[in-house]
Image (tube, helix red, strand yellow):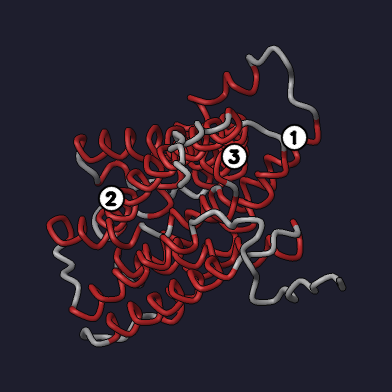
């Protein structure tokens, strides 16, 4: 009779430990970005339905952010090449003032819960599908199922809102879908740019301020005089510091550590948080169908955010042929 010797499990290799730490750090950065983005939908919805307008929100966000992050561009020991500045202009068009404009108008025409569901939930779907032909990142079966679940939850959420008095605005939904598409393109382009999260955030704020503020001032769009000092101070901190600096850097860092598709999928958790915050702040109480849809979206996020193992089969990949013996 032979006696088997019990062996202790082999410790994780250094590379596996490093990859695990990288993913944990990526999820931490994504969680920070999700928290700030969630509050932004509620805060912006409150502002654009009271004294301030989306024009003021854009001015605060990128005007203050541009000033705070300007030393990153001008005080760097290694000056950015001309190509980086051009990339920054493109990033600003995709995730700068035009993006905030689309989401802000969508918020005015819909609700915080609906807006936070449509744009963030569709963004990872767009990012994953666009990464397929452009970056040759073939999504695994689990991730594709996650995308389908996210879309199903999104449809249920819109239908749930449709049961309330007044149908959702088609124009508002179209604006929010467009914002999700531009956000997805930015996510993929940033990953290939070689820029650091801080540099990308600084360029977005700089170009958005340069292109938008002259128009804002020339046409006299400011409504700051109608808002209270407390509201202005709060918006300065949230829009100018948290959104323009902290959230942008956190999201870009998450993209660097997790990859575009996984980081984008984490952002789809926004409807869960925003719908919860909107209850006490905006008095937007979700219906039972909306609650179910939010849970469905969260499940889709968990599936889409999972790393795709090399050996995981794809729904569109032919099975490997056995070699003849």
In the displayed structure, 77 sits above or below 55; it is above
Q: Residues within 10 Å of mark 2 (few under 14, many from 20)?
A: many
The earlier-in-sequence mark between 3 and 2 is 2
For label 2, the residue is 43
Task: Work out whether mark 1 precedes mark 2 in sequence or the reverse, and give the earlier one.
Answer: 2
Q: Report the front residue among 319 and 174.
A: 319
Query: For the residues marked 1 and 2, what is the alpha-carbon distance in whole angstroms?
Result: 32 Å
Tag 1 and tag 2, C-beta contact below 8 Å: no
**Disc 2 element:** helix
Which of pointers 1 and 2 indicates the residue nearer the eye? 1
Q: Looking at the image, can residue 217 be seen?
A: yes
Q: Is residue 244 visible?
A: no
Residue 12 location (% of width, % of height) = 52, 33
Name the residue tied to disc 3: 256
- x then y, percent, for residue 307: 54, 54
Q: Residue at the spot x=34%, y=70% of the render? A: 114
| Callout 3 secondary element | helix
Q: How many numbered marks does the figure carry?
A: 3
Task: Spot the residue most to the right.
Answer: 324
Q: Residue at x 62, y 43 (%)?
A: 211
* Circle 1 residue: 84
């Amino acid at each position: 009779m032979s006696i088997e010797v019990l062996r202790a499990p082999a410790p994780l290799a250094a590379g596996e430990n490093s990859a695990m730490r990288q993913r944990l750090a990526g999820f931490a950065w994504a969680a920070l970005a999700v928290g700030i983005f969630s509050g932004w939908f509620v805060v912006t919805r409150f502002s654009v339905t009271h004294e301030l307008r989306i024009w003021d929100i854009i001015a605060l966000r990128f005007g203050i952010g541009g000033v705070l992050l300007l030393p990153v561009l001008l005080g760097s020991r290694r000056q950015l090449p001309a190509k980086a500045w051009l990339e920054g202009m493109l990033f600003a068009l995709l995730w700068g003032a035009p993006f905030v404009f689309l989401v802000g108008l969508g918020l005015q025409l819909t609700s915080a819960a609906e807006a936070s569901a449509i744009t963030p939930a569709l963004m990872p779907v767009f990012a994953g599908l666009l990464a397929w032909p452009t970056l040759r990142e073939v999504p695994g079966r689990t991730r594709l199922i996650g995308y389908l679940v996210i879309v199903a939850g999104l449809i249920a959420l819109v239908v749930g809102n449709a049961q309330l008095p007044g149908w959702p605005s088609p124009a508002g939904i179209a604006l929010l879908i467009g914002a999700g598409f531009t956000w997805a393109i930015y996510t993929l382009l940033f990953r290939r740019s070689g820029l650091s999260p801080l540099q990308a955030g600084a360029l977005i704020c700089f170009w958005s301020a340069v292109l938008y503020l002259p128009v804002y001032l020339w046409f006299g769009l400011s409504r700051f005089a109608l808002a209270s000092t407390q509201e202005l101070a709060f918006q300065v901190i949230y829009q100018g510091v948290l959104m323009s600096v902290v959230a942008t850097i956190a999201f870009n860092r998450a993209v660097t550590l997790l990859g575009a598709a996984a980081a984008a999928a984490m952002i789809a958790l926004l409807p869960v948080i925003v719908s919860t915050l909107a209850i006490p702040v905006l008095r937007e109480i979700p219906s039972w169908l909306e609650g179910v849809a939010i849970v469905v979206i969260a499940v889709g996020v968990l599936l889409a955010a999972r790393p795709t193992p090399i050996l995981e089969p794809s729904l569109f990949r032919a099975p490997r042929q056995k070699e003849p013996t």
